[in-house]
Amino acid sequence: MQVRSDRDPAFVQSLAHHIDDTVEQLRRGAPSAPHDKLLMMASMTVAEELFEARRELRQVQHKLREKTESMFELIDQIEEEM
């Protein structure tokens, strides 16, 4: 199947491989499942990965903000002592 995209072909191919790999993993767990159900489960699995990655990114951003604020507070304290 050909897919049209404005994205880099290598990137699109890597996405397709990821979906194929996910479908294959699901097929091993449910060998008699219809292909359309495997594709639906693969899409849910990939969406779950995306949501989890976004959640982790938000946590890292929050921690970075906290650390940055602490660093600026320390800099301000050092400047006051000088």
Image (tube, grey):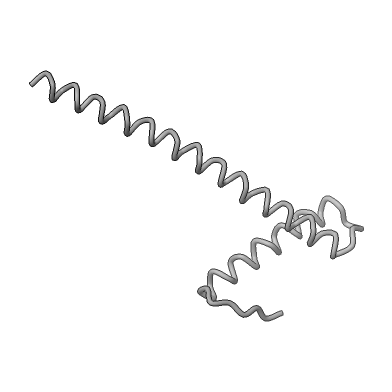
Residue 22 versus residue 64 in the image, above or below: below
In the image, farthest residue toward the top: 81
Q: Quadrant of residue 63?
A: top left
Residue 25 versus residue 1 in the image, above or below: above
Is residue 53 rendered to the left or right of residue 40?
left
Q: Quadrant of residue 42?
A: bottom right
Residue 38 versus residue 81 in the image, above or below: below
Q: Residue at x 54, y 76 (%)?
A: 9
Q: Position of residue 50 (x, y in %)?
A: 61, 51
Q: Which residue is drawn at 69% across and 60% down?
A: 21
Is residue 3 rendered to the left or right of residue 31?
left
- The quarter in which the N terminus is drawn is bottom right
Q: Position of residue 68 (x, y in %)?
A: 32, 34
Q: In which quarter of the image is residue 70?
A: top left
Q: Which residue is drawn at 23% across and 24% down?
A: 74
Q: Position of residue 44 (x, y in %)?
A: 74, 53
